[in-house]
Image: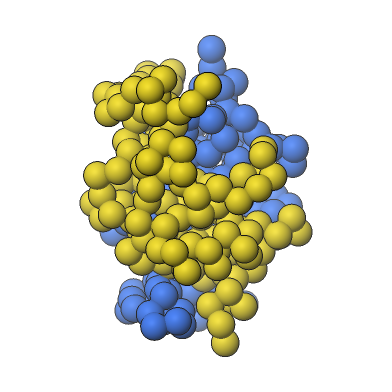
Chain colours: A blue, B yellow
């Protein structure tokens, strides 16, 4: 059976994909449809389906911060993917290594990471 | 502003929550609604909303494998949570430490983890 045939895409044709790096840091969560999953396999670069823009989106296509796939994991229910990528490439469009740069501290979300690049320079206006 | 007010729940009132352990292993992905998020904060144990059973579900309520919360993170868009829990408690109802016990190997999903408990004994029929 092909890899994709064991993935349970939801009613919108999507599956959440958690991207982690080699060190075990969670970088981001995005969604894949069948086409973006196949493109990720074919290219070795994470490609998602943007729900807001309603189109395929290869991570880093604009910023250059492409995430190279090392391993892909499927969960017990077949409805979530984990994609392990090479470390060292920032994943967040706000300039942080990880999108999860806010942490619960004393009842508030507090930024606990430093920016690693300037998003003003990385993205076109 | 309260923690919950910065979370963007989707049209079904849910947000995906990725559970990781202290070692950085991704254990599972489940969904929280407002009530389960508040209950998680209040109890320090991960509580989700089961979409299939349409009710709150404290992880481990049946198996005893309760996941104790260490930290909670919110992503840049406010629509995904990461919950870090104490290591050593198996998360998968199929008997594995992590729900992500299948990995892509040569074009197939291959089980690469050992079971750590017997699900037949942990769950009532």
> Which of A30 and B49 lies nearest the eye of the viewer?
B49
Q: As displayed, is residue A59 above or below residue B93? A: below
User: Image height check: is A105 above or below B49?
Assistant: below
Question: Where residue B54 sits in the image (x, y, percent)?
Answer: 69, 45
Farthest top residue in view: A1
Whether residue A57 sits left or right of residue B106 in the image: it is right
Quadrant of image for the N terminus of chain B: bottom right
Considering only vertical position in the picture, is B25 above or below B97?
below
Kindly tell me whether residue A44 is visible in this rendering: no
Residue A6: percent from the left, percent from the top?
A: 56, 22
Tell me if A86 is positioned left or right of B77 in this view: left
Residue A79 can be seen, yes or no: yes
Residue A32 is left or right of residue A120, and the answer is right
Residue occupying the far front of the picture? B124
Residue at 34% x, 22% y: name it: B118
Q: Residue B10 at what x, y percent from top left? A: 70, 60
- Name the quadrant containing residue A103: bottom left
Above or below, B115 relative to B40: above
Q: How many marks?
A: 0
> Which residue: 39% across, 28% down?
B122
Q: Nearer the viewer, residue B2 or A17?
A: B2
* Foreground residue among B41 and A45: B41
Picture coordinates of residue B97 (x, y %)?
32, 36
Residue ID at (45%, 81%): A107
The residue shown at (38%, 23%) is: B121
**Furthest-bottom residue in this view:** B1
């Amino acid at each position: 059976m092909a890899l994709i045939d064991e993935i349970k895409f939801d009613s919108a044709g999507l599956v959440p994909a958690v991207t982690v790096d080699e060190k075990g840091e969670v970088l981001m969560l995005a969604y894949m449809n069948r086409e973006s999953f196949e493109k990720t396999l074919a290219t070795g670069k994470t490609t998602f389906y943007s729900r807001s823009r309603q189109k395929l989106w290869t991570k880093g296509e604009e910023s250059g911060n492409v995430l190279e796939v090392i391993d892909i994991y499927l969960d017990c229910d077949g409805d979530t993917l984990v994609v392990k990528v090479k470390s060292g490439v920032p994943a967040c469009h706000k300039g942080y290594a990880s999108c999860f740069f806010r942490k619960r501290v004393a009842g508030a979300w507090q930024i606990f990471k430093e920016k690693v690049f300037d998003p003003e320079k990385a993205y076109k206006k």
